[in-house]
Image (tube, helix red, strand yellow):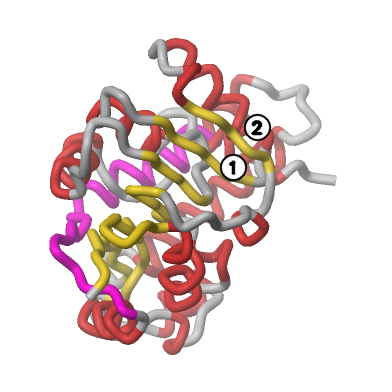
Amino acid sequence: MIDRQRLSSVAHSHHPIAAPVSGVSVNRILRRADRRPAARILDLGCGEAAWALQALTHYPDGHADGVDISRYALERAAAAAAQRGLADRLTLHERDARQYVPDGDYDLVMCIGSTHAFGGFDETVRLAGRHVNADGILLAGEGFWQVPPTPAALAALDAVPEDFTDLAGLVDVAERAGWTPVYAHVSDAAEWDNYEWSWVGSLTEWALDNPGHPDAAAAGTLAREHREQWLRGYRGVLGFVTLVLRRM
């Protein structure tokens, strides 16, 4: 059986931010979400905790909790935290984001590129928002139709048009749930290309470097299939936005 969590971790080897967002953009977004030095931070679907770790550099007395179901990603997150001297300020939880008990007292809650954990963007802003205190910030990153979806894009994403809305529609969803954007970052073409080439390239290199591994052939096949889906399908069609949200 293919270990998909392992392959996902490998795919993000050169781009631990599991979304088409550059490091420079992450810092800009976090500056706009700045609250206080001792902020409590929660990253739901944290992957390798790239966002949480960077947030801790903005909040020098803060503490972060990272939640994810992938033990491979969490192992990488723990190693990265230790390397950056942040291990004592990051607590990792191997569990489904839906099962993380809300206490409503986090200053900053993030769910970026992981809204599938809640079943979509509307459920994410509703359920992840329960963790945010009255004056806190919710960072939510989600895909949207940059242009009307083509048949090739829908086939590549195994999607229907209703699976995503346009950017204005996402803002409407957030506001219906009681949140309003105070800033947003829309990923540009360079960020998308860097993310996708890193994802495909990391898997391809791993397959070439580990020919005897039982998952090597599957990794190579997955990389080729993903590359075709992206280049011939949703490139330039699917956008990505990270919204900085406050309660209305």
Q: Residue 205 at x, y = what percent?
A: 52, 27
Q: Answer above or below: position of 84 versus 4.
A: above
Instruction: Mark yes or no: residue 77 visible.
Output: yes
Q: Which residues are magenta?
A: 178-203
- Which residue lies most toward the right here? 1
Q: Answer above or below: position of 83 versus 48.
A: above
| Closer to the eye: label 1 or 2 | 2
Q: Answer above or below: position of 136 versus 151.
A: above
Q: Which residue is mark 2?
A: 72
Name the side, left or right, on which 194 lies relative to 67. left
Q: Which residue is mark 1?
A: 8
Number of numbered labels in the structure image: 2
Please tell me which residue is depicted at 49% across the width and 86% down the height of the picture: 160
For this rendering, which residue is in front, 101 or 224? Answer: 101
Circle 2 packing at 10 Å, graded few (<14), some (14-19), many (20+), is some
Residue 43 quadrant: top left
Amino acid type of the residue tagged 2 in the rendering: Tyr
Residue 146 quadrant: bottom left
- The numbered mark, 1 or 2, whose residue comes first in the sequence reads 1
Q: Residue 145 at x, y = what percent?
A: 30, 77
Amino acid type of the residue tagged 1 in the rendering: Ser
Q: Residue 214 at x, y = what percent?
A: 80, 32
Dot 1: what SS? helix
Instruction: Mark yes or no: residue 149 visible.
Output: no
Name the side, left or right, on which 66 lies relative to 40. right
